[in-house]
Structure formats: structure tokens, C-alpha cells
Image: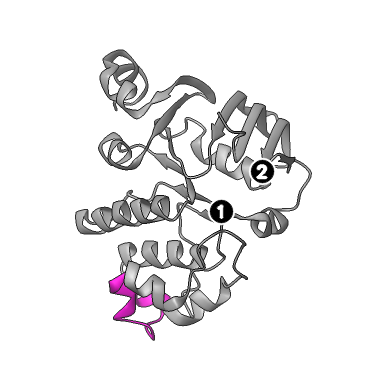
Amino acid sequence: MAEPLLSLKRVCAFYGRAQILFDVNLSIQAGEVVALMGRNGAGKTTTIRSIMGLVDQRRGRIEFDGKSIVQTEPFLINRLGIGWVPEDRRIFTDLTVLENLDVGRRPARPGMPAWSIERLFRLFPNLGEMPDRLGGRMSGGEQQMLAVARTLMGNPRLVLLDEPSEGVAPLIVEQMAEMIFELKRQGLSVLLSEQNLEFAALVSDRAYVLEKGQVRFEGSIEELEANDEVRRQYLTI
């Protein structure tokens, strides 16, 4: 197997004196969609924030494209090719759709697809119908699409999606699934933080299940679907 695009080895993370992650090991290959699953508070968002360099207190190795990024500033991690769509979207509500997309613009990367506004409007037709609408006047689902599109304007190699299906309409969830399929077809990698097993199973190749900051399961998405014990113990509410 080729070297992973992203790997975490024995990653621990802390907020103050509270330890949140305990020796987390995780890897993603180029062009792979990996689901990071678990209940609220399991450590999914902290894992993503640790990758992005947004958790000050952490130990272990985090490598992207074979190089350590543990001591790298978040804005430089983004420039290396990791795009992050946070759970709370964080679009600029006083900017239009076009202006939000322009903020995220970065040069194309060799060997990777170059995302343009026109191409993103084909991927997200809803956004193409409202280029001049202010972010604050969009629905939650539309804001989610805009957050993803803005991240893609940075031409990332790896996209971190934190709970993309949470709190949005079923139609938007379908469009998010189509978007992830398209990213995979274009050779991008995706780390998908999710609680919704049905959505994760639709789009993912493999899955990790977290509970109290520890990896409790690692395997193919089919193996997770077939493992009643893991789903009952770590995923059901």
C-alpha cells in the first residue's frame, strides 16, 4: 500500500488539564473517503482541530504527504493543501456568495483539479442562483454548501468535513453526498466527521469509531455496518 496522504500516530490532545484524545492512530490514502464516527463528545472535532494545528496541547505525530505538521501554523497547514469545513460553517455573513468564494481563492496545485467559481456553481446549483445574496440571508443548508465551496476555492488535496449532514434538510444531505462523490472522482481525499451512519456508509471507504477520545473500531465501512456490537456500543444514542 502506498504511503498515506495523512497519518496520525499516537496523538494525544488536551484542553487545559483535561485529556481529550488518547493515542489516536488514523490514516487516509490519496483519493480515499474516511469516516470518523462517534457520539457527541467522542473526540471527533478535537481530532480535526488537532490536524489543523488548532489544539495547542497535543503529543504524537501528524504527517501530511510524508512531512510532520505538528509544529506548523494553521494557515500554513491550509496552504500545504488541507481544507477544513468546520461544524459551525463560519462563513462571512456580511459578504455575498461571490465575495465569500473570493476570500478562499488559492492557486491551483500541480496534478490536482483547479476549482473555479463556475465549476463550483455547477457542483452547487443553489449557489449559482444566488451569487449576490449575503451569507447572513441564506438557510443553514445553503450556508453549509457555501462553506464547502469556499474551502474548495483553496484547491485542497484533503478536505476535513465536520458534521456536514447535521441540521440540514434531506435534499441538502443528498447534494452533500453527490459533492463527496465528485471530490473522490477528482482524486481528492476526505476525512468526514459524522454521527449519521447511513450518510457515512453511502460515501465512505473506511471508518474509525471514537469513544472517549480512543479509537474503538477501524475497518471498512461494510465491516462497520455488519458489526452490530460496535454500532450498539459506540454509535447508537
The residues colored magenta run 124-138
Q: Secondary structure at mark 2?
A: loop
Q: Nearer the viewer, residue 102 or 181?
A: 181
Report the disc number at residue 177.
none
Magenta span has 10? no
Residue 2, horizontal then vertical, whole percent: 58, 33
Screen quadrant of the C terminus: top left
Label 2 crowd bin: few (<14), some (14–19), many (20+), radius 10 Å: some
What is the three-letter code of the residue carrying label 2? Asp
Q: CA distance from mark 1 to mark 2?
A: 10 Å
Disc with the residue nearer the chain's start (1 vs 2): 2
**Do the CB atoms of the residues marked 1 and 2 lie less than 8 Å apart?**
yes
Q: Give the farthest residue toward the right.
A: 71
Residue receiving disc 2: 65
Q: Secondary structure at mark 1?
A: loop
Screen quadrant of the N terminus: top right
The quarter of the displayed image where residue 40 is located: top left
Residue at point 45% right, 52% down? 87
Residue at point 40% right, 71% down? 120
Residue 127, horizontal then vertical, whole percent: 34, 74
- Is residue 136 positioned above or below 86 on the image? below
Q: Is residue 56 left or right of residue 8?
A: right
The quarter of the displayed image where residue 26 is located: top right
Magenta span has 133? yes
Tell how many labels.
2
Residue at point 75% right, 40% down? 68
Label 1 crowd bin: few (<14), some (14–19), many (20+), radius 10 Å: many
Do we see residue 96 in this rendering?
Answer: no
Report the disc number at residue 157.
1
Residue at point 67% right, 32% down? 14
- Is residue 59 positioned above or below 53 on the image? above
